[in-house]
Image (tube, rainbow, N blue to C red):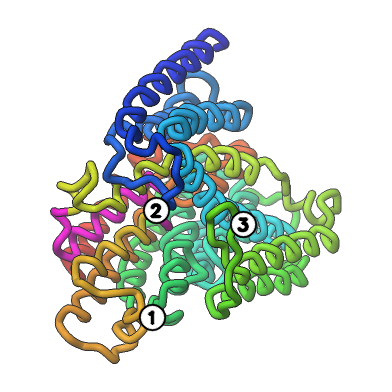
């Protein structure tokens, strides 16, 4: 294994040197190091996304060929290597603009992203469902239904962390458990978060740019209901068949403890996090300039409040306390997500810049082909499966505005029905397609949405052998893609 890791490291160095040569050629115009607010995506070659592809392949392949626990033990080092392979040539070639891009994505995207996940993960880990739960098809379906319903109101991360451990404990005696976790990721960690800006990060970005809070509830409800109902019925059928194949009998361990929920006072901290998110999208308190990056004060206040809520949860339900121990709480899942996504956010910079360049960038053909809602749904969705779905949503949000010659200032009027010209109605149709593409197709891969990765890590901690990166994609292609085709014909 040491030889294989050394070989991979040497390959990364070679890739980095090749990128440096190519980026120097494209960045020659910026040799003075002047700061212009970020690298123009039109200057970036398509092969600048090689480190991003490399980190994705590392996540997919290394656990298969090196060690099944590779990401737990070496995920941080792998992430750092790929981030360095991109960042060093990028900084040398584009200097001030490259530094701005890196600082921008960490200050405005990664730090808020990981702090929100940490807060929800910490608070939800202090809520424990006790009692005798029997993992029957009816109970499992009920847990998935509850998770799907609450995900839009406590976030997909909050709902996932609240219910994944009770689901695993209830099915400890079951032989076949993978399908439970896969459908949980589909429904609770992704599709259930379709109805409010709190549910999923892409919708929150839309809220910050003028999309009314309850517009997503009314606009996306039919799409969410159709795909959720089909998935829940399909899950019940599959789980029933699995249950019967295993004998169809729940073993009696002699316990019959009533169901109760402990640590409910953590709901106060959970609602505090939700309130902090809503506050940051409602109030405008000006901004501070941090080395050229403009950060809003209300966003800083949001991060501080989230950290305070998490620390209060830890104070009243300590990490070493009986409640969290009974909940099998550990920092490993959030640490794994933080390390791996730190590299993903770094290496994603050129991909997002090229997309943002639109028809002037290396993906001009792709952008030019986007004309109808169906195009926006599939392209936004497929890219959201591998890129971070929040900036991908924002990219195509702006693409739709640009194609229709509209500005952000009219978004609230359009979506509230005050503007009803054809181009305004067309924007509404495009935004629906972009929204469901970003949220629904985040379920296609482990990295499509951060809760996916966390649920996978918790399941593996509990001894469930989860599918590989590509193995999970086989599930999503077989189950979700036909449903996306149905959504396309019914709604788009």
As drawn, 97 above or below 356:
above
Q: Tag 2 or tag 1, which sits nearer the N-term?
A: 1
Left or right, 386 with reference to 70: left
Point 77% across, 66% down: residue? 262
Q: Secondary structure at mark 2?
A: helix
Can you say which quadrant of the picture contains the N terminus?
A: top right
Which part of the image, by quadrant, shows the C terminus? bottom left
Question: Which one is in front, 67 or 296?
Answer: 296
Label 2 with label 3: CB-CB less than 8 Å: no
Query: How many other residues sit within 10 Å of disc 3, few (<14), some (14-19) or many (≥20)?
Result: many
**Residue located beneath label 3 in the image:** 161
What span is colored magenta in the figure?
Answer: 368-391
Above or below residue 350? Residue 77 is above
| Kind of element beneath mark 1 | helix
Which is more N-terminal, label 3 or label 2?
3
Name the residue that disc number 2 marks.
442
* Sequence order check, earlier mark of 3 and 1: 3
Alpha carbon of mark 2 to alpha carbon of mark 3: how far?
A: 17 Å
Q: What residue does disc 1 label?
A: 215
Task: Verify whether residue 381 appears in magenta.
Answer: yes
> How many residues crowd around disc 2 within 10 Å: few (fewer than 14), some, or many (20 or more)?
many
The residues bearing labels 1 and 2 have C-alpha atoms spaced at a distance of 21 Å
Asked whether 292 or 464 is in front, the reply is 292
Q: CA distance from mark 3 to mark 1?
A: 26 Å
Q: Residues within 10 Å of mark 1 (few under 14, many from 20)?
A: some
Residue at figure coordinates x 70%, y 64% from the top left: 304
Residue at horizontal 40 percent and vertical 40 percent from the top: 472
């Amino acid at each position: 294994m040491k030889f294989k890791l050394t070989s991979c490291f040497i390959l990364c160095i070679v890739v980095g040197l090749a990128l440096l040569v190519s980026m120097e050629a494209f960045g020659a115009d910026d040799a003075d190091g002047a700061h212009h607010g970020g690298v123009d995506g039109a200057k970036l070659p398509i092969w600048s996304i090689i480190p991003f592809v490399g980190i994705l392949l590392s996540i997919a392949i290394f656990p298969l060929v090196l060690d099944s626990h590779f990401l737990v033990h070496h995920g941080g080092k792998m992430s750092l290597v790929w981030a360095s392979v991109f960042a060093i040539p990028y900084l040398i070639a584009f200097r001030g603009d490259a530094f701005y891009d890196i600082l921008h994505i960490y200050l405005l995207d990664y730090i808020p992203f990981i702090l929100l996940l940490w807060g929800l993960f910490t608070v939800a880990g202090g809520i424990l469902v006790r009692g005798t739960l029997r993992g029957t098809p009816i109970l499992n379906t009920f847990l998935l239904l509850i998770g799907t319903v609450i995900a839009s109101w406590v976030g997909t991360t909050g709902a996932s962390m609240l219910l994944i451990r009770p689901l695993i404990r209830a099915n400890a005696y079951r032989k076949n458990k993978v399908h439970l976790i896969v459908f949980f990721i589909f429904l609770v960690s992704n599709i259930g978060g379709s109805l409010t800006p709190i549910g999923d990060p892409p919708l929150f970005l839309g809220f910050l740019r003028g999309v009314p809070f309850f517009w997503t509830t009314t606009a996306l409800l039919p799409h969410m209901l159709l795909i959720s109902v089909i998935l829940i019925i399909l899950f019940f059928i599959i789980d029933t068949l699995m249950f019967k194949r295993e004998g169809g009998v729940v073993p009696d361990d002699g316990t019959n403890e009533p169901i109760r929920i402990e640590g409910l006072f953590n709901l106060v901290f959970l609602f505090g996090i939700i309130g902090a998110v809503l506050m940051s999208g409602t109030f405008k308190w000006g901004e501070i300039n941090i080395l050229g990056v403009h950060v809003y004060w209300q966003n800083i206040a949001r991060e501080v409040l989230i950290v305070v809520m998490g620390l209060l949860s830890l104070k009243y339900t300590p990490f070493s306390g009986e409640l969290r121990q009974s909940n099998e709480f550990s920092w490993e899942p959030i640490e794994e997500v933080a390390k791996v996504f730190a590299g993903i956010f770094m290496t994603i910079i050129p991909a997002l810049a090229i997309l943002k360049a639109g028809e002037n960038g290396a993906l001009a053909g792709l952008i030019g082909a986007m004309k109808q809602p169906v195009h926006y749904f599939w392209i936004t969705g497929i890219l959201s499966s591998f890129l971070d779905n929040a900036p991908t949503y924002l990219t195509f949000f702006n693409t739709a505005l640009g194609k229709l010659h509209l500005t952000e200032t009219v978004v609230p009027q359009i979506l509230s029905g005050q503007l009803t010209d054809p181009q305004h109605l067309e924007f509404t149709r495009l935004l629906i397609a972009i929204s469901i593409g970003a949220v629904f197709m985040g379920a296609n891969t482990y990295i499509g949405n951060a809760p996916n990765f966390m649920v996978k890590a918790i399941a593996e901690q509990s001894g469930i052998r989860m599918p590989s990166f590509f193995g999970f994609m086989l599930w999503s292609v077989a189950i979700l893609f036909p449903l996306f085709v149905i959504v396309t014909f019914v709604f788009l």
